[in-house]
Amino acid sequence: MLRRYITSTASILPLVVLRILVGLVGLLSTIRFMVLGWVDDHYVRPVMHFSYDGFDWVPIPPQPWLDALFVVMALAALGIVLGAWFRITSILFVVLFTWVFLFDKAYYLNHYYFIIVVATLLAMMPAHRAFSVDVLRKPSLRVDRVPRWMVDVFKLQVAIVYIYAGIAKINAPWLLDAMPLRIWLPAHDTMPVIGPLLAKPLTAYVFAWFGMVYDCTIVFFLMHRRTKWYAFGAVVVFHLCTATLFQIGVFPYVMIGMSTIFLVDAHYAHDTVPVPRTIGVLAAFILVQVLLPLRPYFYPGNMFWHEQGFRFGWRVMLMEKAATATFYVMDGEGGRANEREGVVVNSEFLNDMQERQMSTQPDMILQYAHKLAAHYRARGMRDPHVRAEVYATLNAAPGRLLVDPTQNLAVTDDGCAPYAWVTP
């Protein structure tokens, strides 16, 4: 049965639609970064950057080359849209976009990660073999049908996003306290018509429960022929509402576009096609996508507090967290005396967004302490000790210490074990 499925075919049209969608999102995102001056603000001006675990070797090019990188990335995205030299442009876009993504995890967003995942999958597909410049250049490339699994793998990826987002909402703060929606929704009480309704606590509970049920079930309705168009209408309404009420970037529009993969009638047929040699690589890639969001469940405590494994898990709009972080540095040589401590001015090293993100995320707090220790060691301090007083509030709860203020973070390891230096 598995071999029969792998060798069946479907229309190429869904892949063409996705190719154009992914290319446009990549192109507009890249242009937006350049036009708004974010290339300079995010990657040139800050003295320090926060690398992802295992990727501290990723370099940030100097500005002339960095600007050129973004220009080439935009051209590669345009090549994806047009289906022009698709193998080259799609791989080039994935490499460059991932490279920029790895520059600094302070700017992590789910939709950036989603673009990387979908663009990587797309680069493995023959999405350029219809309605493309490549077909105009070489008509023999044109095909009307592709292996069915090439379409279904994108449906599976959308299902992974939605279902994990729904599972993440099955928690007491979201369902029993309607947090953080009870904080966010009243901020829109001046909206015409629905403003007063958004200020009512009951509305937050309705949004919370509906959001959980929607995420957990919408894919199944999209997959059913009789309900897919009604489900797509729900997708459009749901994501337009979230885009209006919450500042979550282009993620709602990306999900609307990706959901169109369920609408095109694939006209499945059992033709004879060879089993591709890359099927193992693709299966491993999907397995990683399935397993990666499970990481937080292996750590004790409140995931929203310690945030171990929080990224790459499709946890969207689940908490309101804010913090203030004050760092103290002293030379440990010759004993410890509080009066010898110096207070770090964070703005000398980080921009506003970096400082805001660092203050709430323990792994970034520790990484910042290590960078401060290296900075002061390079300036003559023999044994820099770095400690932090970080007061954080989660979902409007009273502020409390996030990390142990007596811990010398300069010598604290950031491993895979639970963070012993984060308060329970």
Image (cartoon, rainbow, N blue to C red):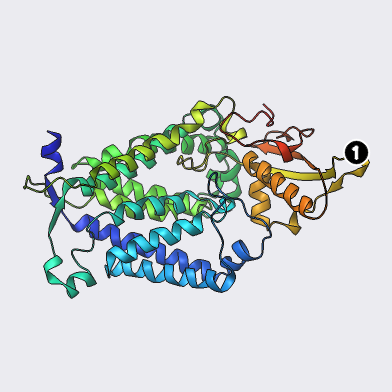
Residue situated in front as seen by the camera: 412 or 312 = 412
Q: Residue furthest right?
A: 339
Q: Is residue 361 above or below residue 66?
A: above
Q: Residue at x 7, y 44 (%)?
A: 270
Quarter of the picture holding the N terminus? top left
- The answer to whether residue 159 is visible is no
The residue labelled by disc 1 is: 334
- Residue 246 in the image, given as x and y percentages of width and height: 52, 50
Identify the element where label 1 is drawn.
Answer: loop
In the image, taking residue 356 as reference, residue 281 lies left or right, namely left
Residue 183 location (% of width, % of height): 61, 41
Is residue 388 toward the left or the right of residue 116 in the image? Answer: right
Q: Quadrant of the C terminus?
A: top right
Q: Is residue 379 left or right of residue 146?
A: right
The image shows residue 45 at horizontal and vertical percentages of 66, 65
Q: Residues within 10 Å of mark 1 (few under 14, many from 20)?
A: few
Q: Quadrant of residue 334?
A: top right
In-front residue for pair 69/235: 69
Across and down, in percent, residue 315 comes to 48, 40
Residue at 46 percent of width and 39 percent of height: 313
Between 258 and 114, the residue placed more toward the observer is 114
Picture layout, residue 26 above or below residue 50:
below
Is residue 334 visible in the rendered image? The answer is yes
